Structure formats: structure tokens, C-alpha cells
């Protein structure tokens, strides 16, 4: 029972960290040039994922962390492809491409 | 002369090669980790954390070193991300012996990943070499690079780092110092080849070269410390 409660609490904490990072990352695109939004988002995502991996490794029989991990993995995949695509099409070294406003200039 | 047109229609080659480099690197690292006794789930979770950390660190280094002006993937930052992921997973797993195994396997696969990713740079026209018209020169055309003839520095990196990777895989069981030597040789190769990049023109030593020197120095200090510890 105690173990169940720990797993749920840690999962919620990881979800909170991850969600904060994701919100920062998605809504902070246009502020990258002025602030450290990108760095903070990355760190939050990292701590959120690391925490959920920690629960998965230490409590391998629990299902909740595994479901969260699958969701995280999917989100990461989308973000990684988005970043790589933006990096690939950007030849102007400005911030517009990253915010989805690539004009082809 | 090798002709490369950097105008592409639907699929840009750069992200394709970066994704392929991660796929190849992670598969080899997963196999090496399993072979060295790392649990299957830990080796699997590492494959999830490593690419994210590598891309994040790679972008952060470019972002910070340019004073918040540019985004782009830095290979040295990517290397730091791969090590950070390996270290995190080793600490999570809670077995002290796994730290050295994961870091060792990470070092072995990095030249392979770098080798493949440089094909992406070659095709996209970024990180290109100094102006050169001799044998094997690259003739670029297209809007991303304009028309120019340059030294095939990305191709040289691809070939050399593939050789370093293969040597590392062949010699790792025969000599216990193979992994640190692979690390030093990789950093030294990158340091030397950076002189042939156009972006290096007008600089005595680039930021990437400074980081390479720092990596070499750190590895040498670790080697000396280990040798001293073994003697005691």
C-alpha cells in the first residue's frame, strides 16, 4: 500500500515537471531569443523523464509509470522531429523557423 | 570533383541523417550494453533518454555559445548529452559497476554517430570546408550554399570517424586502454579537421577546438589518476 502511494506521488511529480517543461517548450517558442525558456524547458523535461524512468526501474511491476513513459516517448518523438525539421530548413539563422514562421527566405 | 546540389524538395537530408545516426548509435549501444551485462530494461530506457538529452545539449551549446542568437546542433554538446543520459541511467539503476560500462559503450559508439551525421552536413552544405579546387573537392550548387568549390572536410570526417569506430570495436577487448585512447583520438581528429573548415577562417582557435582540447586534457588527467591509483 505504501509502495503504491509512493509510485503514484512520484508519477504525479514527474508529470508536473514534464508538463511544465512541455508548456514552456510549446508556448515559449517566440521568447527563445530573449530568455532561457528553451534551457528551462529542456531541464524540466529531463528531470520529469528521469524520474519516471527511475520509478520504472525501481518498481518494474507497476503499470502507471510505464503508461506515462509511453506518453513521454511519443511527445519527445514529436518534439525531436519538429526541432530537426526546423534546424534543417533554417538557413537564415534567425528565430522565425523555430516558431513555425519559416518564410523560405 | 564531387557535385552536390543543396536544393531539395520534400525531404531535407540533414534530419534524415541525424535520425539515422541516432538509430545506428542507439542500436549498437543497446547491443553492447546487453552483452556487457546491463539489464534489458535499463539499456532500453537509455535509448529513450539519450537522443533527447543529446539533441537538447547539442542545441543548448550552440545557443549559449552564440549568446542566445542561433540554434543548431553542436556535436560536442551532443556528446555531453549522451554522457549525461548514460550517467543518469547508471545512477538510476543503482549499480556502481554499470556506470563505467555505460560510459565505455557510449564512448565507443560516438564516432559512429558522428560519422553518419556528417553525411547530413555534407548533403546539406553546412560545416563545409575551405575553398579548394584539387582532388575530391566538393562542387556545391543551390540556394543553401551558392556555387563554390570546397575541401571535403565532412567526407573526411565521415571516413576517419568510421575507421575510429571500427578500430574501437576491434580493439576494445584486446587492450584495456582502448576506450580512453579512442576518446582522445576522436577529440584530436575533430580538433585538427576544424582547421579545414571555412568557419575557422580568421580564427586562431575556434570554440569547438577549445572544447576538444578540454576533453583531451580531462581524459589525460583521468588516465594519469587511474595509473597512479593502480600503482598505490
Image (spheres, helix red, strand yellow):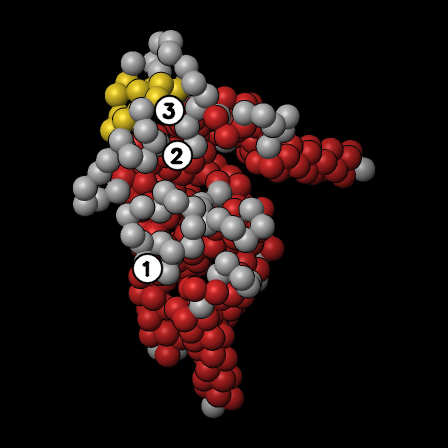
The residue that mark 1 highlights is A100
Residue B41 is left or right of residue A51, and the answer is left
Q: Dot 2: what SS?
A: loop
How many numbered marks appear?
3
The residue that mark 3 highlights is B155
Query: Residue B147's spot in the image, x, y percent?
Result: 31, 24
Q: Does B177 sit above or below residue B106?
A: above
In the picture as drawn, the residue positioned furthest to the left comes out as B9
C-alpha gap between disc 2 and disc 3? 12 Å
Estimate how packed mark 3 is, as few (under 14), some (14 to 19) or many (20 or more) residues with alpha carbons within 10 Å.
many
Q: Dot 3: what SS?
A: helix
Q: Mark 1 lies on which chain?
A: A
Residue at 43 percent across and 32 percent down: it is: B127
C-alpha gap between disc 1 and disc 2? 21 Å
Q: Which chain carries label 3?
A: B
Query: Residue B190's spot in the image, x, y percent?
Result: 52, 29
Query: Residue B164's spot in the image, x, y percent?
Result: 46, 26
Disc ID at residue B88: none
User: Is residue B80 in sight in this rendering?
Assistant: no
Q: Mark 2 lies on which chain?
A: B
Estimate how packed mark 2 is, as few (under 14), some (14 to 19) or many (20 or more) residues with alpha carbons within 10 Å.
some
Q: Does B80 sit above or below residue B190?
A: below
Residue B18 is left or right of residue B198, and the answer is left
Query: Residue B144's spot in the image, x, y percent?
Result: 32, 35
Q: Does B224 sit above or below residue B43?
A: above
Amino acid at each position: 500500500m505504501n509502495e503504491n502511494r509512493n509510485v503514484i506521488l512520484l508519477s504525479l511529480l514527474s508529470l508536473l515537471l514534464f508538463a511544465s517543461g512541455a508548456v514552456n517548450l510549446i508556448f515559449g517558442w517566440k521568447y527563445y531569443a530573449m530568455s532561457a525558456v528553451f534551457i528551462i524547458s529542456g531541464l524540466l523535461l529531463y528531470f520529469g523523464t528521469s524520474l519516471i524512468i527511475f520509478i520504472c526501474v525501481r518498481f518494474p511491476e507497476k503499470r502507471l509509470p510505464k503508461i506515462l513513459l509511453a506518453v513521454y516517448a511519443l511527445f519527445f518523438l514529436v518534439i525531436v522531429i519538429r526541432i530537426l525539421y526546423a534546424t534543417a530548413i533554417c538557413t537564415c539563422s534567425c528565430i522565425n523557423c523555430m516558431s513555425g514562421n519559416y518564410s523560405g527566405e | 570533383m564531387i557535385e552536390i546540389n543543396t536544393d531539395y524538395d520534400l525531404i531535407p537530408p540533414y534530419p534524415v541523417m541525424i535520425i539515422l545516426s541516432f538509430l545506428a548509435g542507439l542500436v549498437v549501444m543497446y547491443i553492447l550494453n546487453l552483452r556487457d551485462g546491463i539489464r534489458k530494461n535499463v539499456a532500453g530506457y537509455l535509448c529513450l533518454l539519450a537522443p533527447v538529452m543529446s539533441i537538447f545539449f547539442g542545441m543548448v551549446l550552440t545557443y549559449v555559445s552564440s549568446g542566445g542568437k542561433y540554434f543548431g546542433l553542436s556535436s560536442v554538446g551532443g556528446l555531453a548529452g549522451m554522457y549525461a543520459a548514460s550517467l543518469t541511467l547508471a545512477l538510476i539503476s543503482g549499480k556502481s559497476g554499470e556506470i563505467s560500462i555505460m560510459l565505455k559503450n557510449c564512448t565507443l559508439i560516438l564516432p559512429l554517430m558522428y560519422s553518419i551525421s556528417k553525411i547530413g552536413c555534407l548533403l546539406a552544405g553546412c560545416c563545409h570546408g575551405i575553398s579548394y579546387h584539387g582532388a575530391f573537392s566538393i562542387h556545391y550548387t543551390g540556394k543553401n550554399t551558392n556555387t563554390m568549390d570546397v575541401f571535403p572536410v565532412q567526407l573526411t570526417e565521415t571516413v576517419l570517424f568510421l575507421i575510429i569506430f571500427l578500430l574501437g570495436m576491434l580493439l576494445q577487448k584486446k587492450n584495456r586502454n582502448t576506450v580512453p585512447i579512442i576518446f582522445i583520438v576522436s577529440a584530436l581528429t575533430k580538433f585538427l579537421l576544424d582547421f579545414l573548415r571555412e568557419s575557422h577562417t580568421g580564427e586562431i582557435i575556434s570554440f569547438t577546438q577549445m572544447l576538444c582540447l578540454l576533453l583531451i586534457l580531462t581524459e589525460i588527467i583521468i588516465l594519469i589518476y587511474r595509473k597512479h591509483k593502480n600503482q598505490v
